[in-house]
Amino acid sequence: MAKCQVKIGGMSCSFCAETLRKSVSRLDGIHRVNVSLAHEEALVEFDPERVDETQIKGAIRSVGYTVRDPKKIRTFEEEEAELRRERNRLLLAAAFTAIAFGQMVLMWLGEAALTMRLMPVMRWTMPLLAVATVFGPGLYILKMAIPSLRRGILNQHVLLEFGALAGLAGGTLGFFRPDFPMADFFAVAVFITTYHVLSGYASLFVRTRASQAVRKLMELQPPTARVIRDGRETEVPIEEVAPGDLVRVRPGESIPVDGVVADGASAVDESLVTGEPIPKEKVAGDEVIGGSLNQSGTLVVRVTKVGEESFLQQVARHIEEARALKPGIIQLVDRILKWYVPGVLTFAGLAILIWTAGAWLVTGQPDWTRATFAALAVLVMGYPCALGMATPLAMIRGGGEAARQGILMRSGEAFAVFKDITKIVLDKTGTITIGKPRLLDVHAVQGEAREVLR
């Protein structure tokens, strides 16, 4: 079996992960597919004699997602540009929704005379707002729903489009039938499309901020190091430093590498690692950790670990792995989501059947208006993105916030059981201090405290 790691763009909730897993799993020769919402990536094990990476990436693109290079880390500017693009899409949808909502409130609360004056205006503005929302800010949803439906994958995009298009269909019917509530149906199409755009933006915002919190941890390591080679000191990128090199670190600088002191003596602040507020004295033969702060003297450090083996890289990897782990509650959500959309669509179909065939059997007259309303209500109220988004995003957000506070989450399960913890045992005071000692009080055995301090 071969392995393929694919970075994916456009994911928003657990439904997306399940859609991608189904799409890739249907290829011949796929052994296992793991999709991580936190990482926005898929790890695929496959038989290279039956399927190749091009086909795997094609299956991902076929359901509306994008593929990026897993070795290329997106810059802060790229992430912020994507956030701005999604925010602009949300603001446009929100503007359409505000206009539609305002008109609906006036219609619901207005007097008969006001309603009569408002109806001719709404007859044209509501269809325009609905079409503009569904095929404007919401067009990307339709582009993802069509290929998913074509491949027999029922996800949140498909369910959203069922609801939105049903709203458009009901509104269009009401446009030609005065007894049918045209405005209500068009308003539904506007509201649920905007909610979907909002959920996508919220997901992207949380994941981006959590990712940036981990990146801030990595920024503790300097991008360059002063390497001593052939008696000369040269500043080189940290990627070019190799084990065995000698690196000079001057007072006030961060130590760029993990290593052993070869020459010099200094006090080094290692509170990043140990939590202890007092700097440690380092002399020849002592180990130092990349990211810690050299304070008083100059050190010459012999490099022992670089790249993925360095302390900071391991910390960042542990945080990323913890964000990708699936606690039991998320696994439960994933199992529910497999049956959720088919269940909602089945109940919507039953609603139509009950109010048409059922009503005909009981009263002799099918109630098409109520059947349409009932089916649309099921589709709207059954919209599932909150179910698939809330729990994973809470975990991602929590992991990112912990990283920013210097707390390392090693397990998704441990994260989930924090609510049950009643006692915490700490092995040393350094782990709970603020990192810098400060004078709180003075108790003088003789005389005044001011005299003691002087």
Image: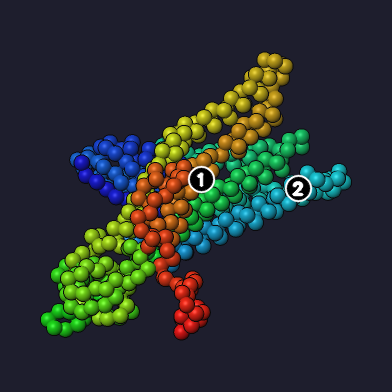
Judge left or right: residue 53 versus residue 444.
left
Residue neighbourhood size for the residue with mark 1, other residues' Cα within 10 Å, grouped as few (<14), some (14–19), many (≥20): some
Q: Secondary structure under badge 2?
A: helix
Q: Nearer the viewer, residue 148 or 194?
A: 194
Judge left or right: residue 317 versus residue 245.
right
Q: Nearer the viewer, residue 175 or 263?
A: 263
Q: Secondary structure under badge 1?
A: helix
- From what the image shows, is residue 389 above or below residue 373? below
Residue linked to disc 1: 390
Residue neighbourhood size for the residue with mark 2, other residues' Cα within 10 Å, grouped as few (<14), some (14–19), many (≥20): few
Residue 135 showing in the rendered view: no
Q: Picture coordinates of residue 319 (x, y %)?
A: 36, 54
Q: Nearer the viewer, residue 273 or 91?
A: 273
Residue drawn where x is 46% and y is 84% of the image = 454
Residue drawn where x is 41% and y is 70% of the image = 436
Residue linked to disc 2: 105
Residue drawn where x is 56% and y is 39% of the image = 383
